[in-house]
Amino acid sequence: QVQLVESGGGLVQAGGSLRLSCAASGRTLSSYVMTWFRRAPGKEREFVAGVNWSSDRTWYTDSAKGRFTISRDNAKNTVYLQMNSLKPEDTAVYYCAAGVGLGSLPYWGQGTQVTVSS
């Protein structure tokens, strides 16, 4: 059974930075696509960023481009999301998800809260 555990969330002022981590256990996910999603209060869950197994392809939602960077360390079975220039509208619960592709993500973490104050 795969388990994903997110960490690194918290409260930060607008313009600040946070680095989220997602550690996987149960099996190696080095061949999987790793992604970050978020759900803001009162909104549907949305895709934020993704990275393929070799890190030579990344994907971002438009609002994350230029501010967020996704990366992974396959040796540590961990994926990261570096978030810079944070805005209040980035406030959400951030989830890590993994699978064989962006359309097949059966493994999800429990989420970590990110709150950006204005």
Image (cartoon, rainbow, N blue to C red):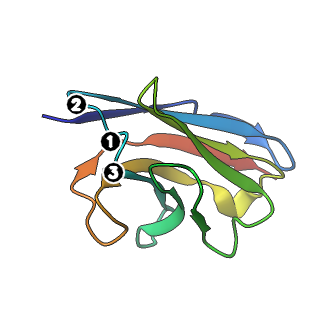
Mark 3 crowd level (few <14, some 14–19, many ≥20, 10 Å Cα)? many
Tell me which label, 3 or 2, sits earlier in the chain: 2
The amino acid sitting under disc 1 is Gly
**Nearest to viewer (mark 2 / mark 1):** 2
Q: Looking at the image, which residue is at 46% across and 72% down?
A: 43
**Nearest to viewer (mark 3 / mark 2):** 2
Task: Read off the residue under disc 1.
Answer: 109
Tell me which label, 3 or 1, sits earlier in the chain: 3
Tell me which label, 2 or 1, sits earlier in the chain: 2
Judged from this view, the residue extending furthest toward the bottom is 62
Say above or below: 77 vs 117.
Answer: above
> On the picture, is 60 further left or further right than 17?
left
Say above or below: 63 vs 109.
Answer: below
User: Which sits in the foreground, 97 or 117?
Assistant: 97
Cα separation, mark 2 vs mark 1, equals 14 Å
Say above or below: 115 vs 102.
Answer: above
Q: Looking at the image, which residue is at 69% across and 64% down?
A: 64
The amino acid sitting under disc 3 is Ala
**Nearest to viewer (mark 3 / mark 1):** 3
Mark 1 crowd level (few <14, some 14–19, many ≥20, 10 Å Cα)? some
The amino acid sitting under disc 2 is Arg
Instruction: Assign a secondary structure to mark 2.
Output: loop
User: Which sits in the foreground, 87 or 85?
Assistant: 85
Instruction: Assign a secondary structure to mark 1.
Output: loop
Say above or below: 113 vs 59.
Answer: above
Instruction: Assign a secondary structure to mark 3.
Output: strand
Q: Looking at the image, which residue is at 61% across and 67% down?
A: 60
Q: Looking at the image, which residue is at 24% across and 49% down?
A: 107
Task: Read off the residue under disc 2.
Answer: 27
